[in-house]
Image (spheres, helix red, strand yellow):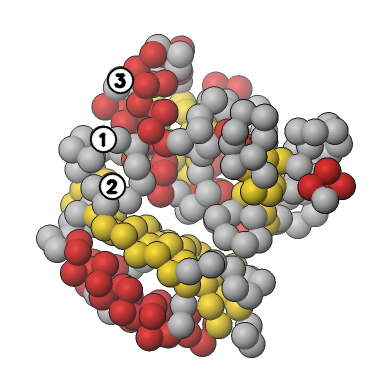
Amino acid sequence: MATPKIVLFYVFAPLPDPEAISLWQHSVCSSLGLRGRIIVSSHGINATVGGDIRDVKRYVKATRGYPAFKNADIKWSDGVGDDFPRLSVKTRPEIVTFGAPDEIRVDSDGVIGGGTHLSPDELHQLVAERGDEVTFLDGRNTIEAQIGRFRDAIVPDIDTTRDFIPLLESGALDHLKNKPVVTYCTGGVRCEVLSALMVNRGFSQVYQLDGGIVRYGERFADSGLWEGSLYVFDKRMTMDFGSPAVIGKCVECGEPTSNVVNHPDRDGRDLAVLCVSCAT
């Protein structure tokens, strides 16, 4: 492979025939020899696809040719080759499984009634204006936050996105209902849903980082409010912006590491933060 690239994007828009979109996406990727994971629902599409840069560019052009996807915010990053074991294209009730397909409403502009989108610069402006009032809420699974997160963020004990609704309804975050809360996740898709779920449950000042950690890292690298490495859902497992401090700790020996591996730990989980020495 000459130059491996990975693209990450999502679009929330009404899709009257998601099964047809899935078949089309599978056909395009297969014809170009691309691999990755694509989920399509009546709410839109969520995709991470990798391959040779020329083929990925053709895929992006074809995908943007569909009217609902023409303005897709495509996030590019360098792959390492064979970044995904296979091509998986699935039709599901939700493009991110929070367990609330009937609660989320979308139109041609995206999710209806979600949080206020903030660019990375607007996020810094909010923090400058509101200071310690601003709370960062990690919208990812706990394992992801172990190696990287926003400074002083709340990191819920979450194994899957299905855990968020019970958390919100437990009252554990009620002290934030009248405070500015900034949700963030890898590329932004999880926060599109999470922020809407929060607004629906009485949180009055909900924001979401537009483009997620990826866009923030591209803008500020390791000179902003982000600390550590970013977990990603491909062969690389992690990526860095600049030369960040290592905040993760090996679950076996406690040494600092950003290494995440498929390694069942004592609780039976498939992913673990494990230093290279313990992993071998």
Question: Compared with residue 194, is residue 58 higher up or lower down, i.e. above or below?
Answer: below
Q: Position of residue 172 (x, y in %)?
A: 45, 13
Q: Position of residue 98 (x, y in %)?
A: 34, 37
The local crowd at label 1, few if under 14, some if 14 to 19, many if 20 or more residues have their Cα within 10 Å, is some
Q: Quick one: label 1 or label 3, which is nearer the N terminus? A: 1
Q: Position of residue 105 (x, y in %)?
A: 19, 43
Mark 1 = which residue? 100
Q: Is residue 72 left or right of residue 52?
A: left
**The disc labelled 3 sits on which kind of residue?**
Gly
The local crowd at label 2, few if under 14, some if 14 to 19, many if 20 or more residues have their Cα within 10 Å, is many
Tell me the SS state at disc 3. Answer: loop
Tell me the SS state at disc 2. Answer: loop
Residue 202, labelled with which disc? 3
Question: Compared with residue 6, is residue 30 higher up or lower down, i.e. above or below?
Answer: below
Q: How many marks?
A: 3
Whole-angstrom CA distance, mark 1 to mark 3, is: 17 Å
Give the quarter of the figure containing the N terminus. bottom right
**The disc labelled 2 sits on which kind of residue?**
Glu
Tell me the SS state at disc 1. Answer: loop
The local crowd at label 3, few if under 14, some if 14 to 19, many if 20 or more residues have their Cα within 10 Å, is some
Q: Is residue 110 left or right of residue 214?
A: left
| Quarter of the figure with residue 131 | top right
Residue 94, labelled with which disc? 2
Q: Residue at x 53, y 67 (%)?
A: 85
Q: Are the residues flagged by discs 2 and 1 in contact, CB closer than 8 Å?
A: yes
Q: Are the residues flagged by discs 2 and 3 in contact, CB closer than 8 Å?
A: no
